[in-house]
Image (spheres, rainbow, N blue to C red):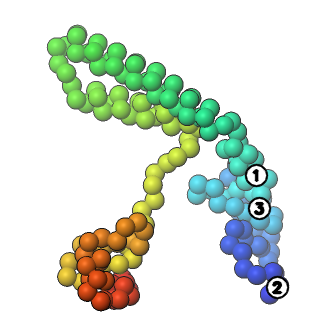
Amino acid sequence: MTASDGLQFERAEFDQTPTTECAACKAPLANYYYDVNGRTVCEKCRYAIEASLNDGSALGRVGRAFGAGLVAAILGSALYYAIAALTGYELGLIAIVVGFGVGSAVRWGSGGRGGKGRKVAAKYANPADPTETWTGRGRKPRWLAAKLKEGDRIEKFLIK
């Protein structure tokens, strides 16, 4: 890599032959590797995975997720009422199982799209109450807005 190429952070470039293999096709990683959901894959598999994620329209995935969730909800409701009718008990644990089933069906229907939101580290903290923090995203919290209105600089509240 020459100085005129600039910095890039999307792929690693090897100086020597690596001993690692692709998690998808088990081929040795020759020139580049990519991280896909915590697994190391070769360039060919990376593009194949990306292409498979883009299959179908967003509306189609929403419809499939809705349909799968609806079917799971109907089956879960039937299970809940069958147990209630047979035993005379209305168990809350069954409602949790039904919710898990619906969530799993929706994730399957959407093709695994979406996912857990990522936590963002706090960037600012209230010196008077360190439990009050702010990531720097969204609206400023009341304590910070009040301090800034009093004339304090935002740098004073940076977490170091």
* Furthest-left residue in this view: 88
User: Which residue is found at the position 52% from the left and 32% from the top?
Assistant: 65
Mark sitting on residue 96:
none
Question: Helix, strand, or loop for circle 3?
Answer: loop
Q: Does 102 sit above or below residue 33? A: above
Tag 1: amino acid: Tyr
Instruction: Quarter of the image for the N terminus: give it.
Output: bottom right
- Residue 101 is situated, as x and y percent measured from the top left of the image, at 41, 30
- Answer with left or right where residue 76 lies relative to residue 105: left
Q: What distance separates the C-alpha of mark 3 from that of mark 1?
A: 15 Å
The percent coordinates of residue 91 (x first, y second) are: 21, 25
Picture disc at residue 4: 2
Whether residue 100 sits left or right of residue 37 in the image: it is left
Return the disc, 1 or 2, that comes first in the chain's sequence. 2
Q: Compute the Cα span from label 3 to label 2.
A: 26 Å
Q: Position of residue 30 (x, y in %)?
A: 81, 64
Task: Categorize mark 3 by other alpha carbons within 10 Å: few (<14), some (14-19), many (20+).
Answer: many
Quarter of the image where one finds residue 92: top left
In the foreground, 148 or 104 = 148
Q: Residue at x 36, y 85 (%)?
A: 154
Could you say which quadrant of the image residue 22 lies in?
bottom right
Relative to the observer, which residue lies in front, 102 or 40? 102
**Label 3 with label 1: CB-CB less than 8 Å:** no
1 or 2: mark nearer the eye = 2
Single out the mark in the foreground, 3 or 2: 2
Residue 115, can we see it?
Answer: yes
Mark 3 is on which residue type?
Leu
Q: Using residue 156 as the reference point, say whether residue 120 is left or right of it.
A: right
Q: Residue 47 has which mark?
A: 1
Q: How many residues crowd mark 1 within 10 Å: few (<14), some (14–19), many (20+)? A: few
Rounded to the nearest angstrom, the CA distance separating label 1 from label 2 is 27 Å
Residue at the spot x=72%, y=79% of the render? Answer: 7
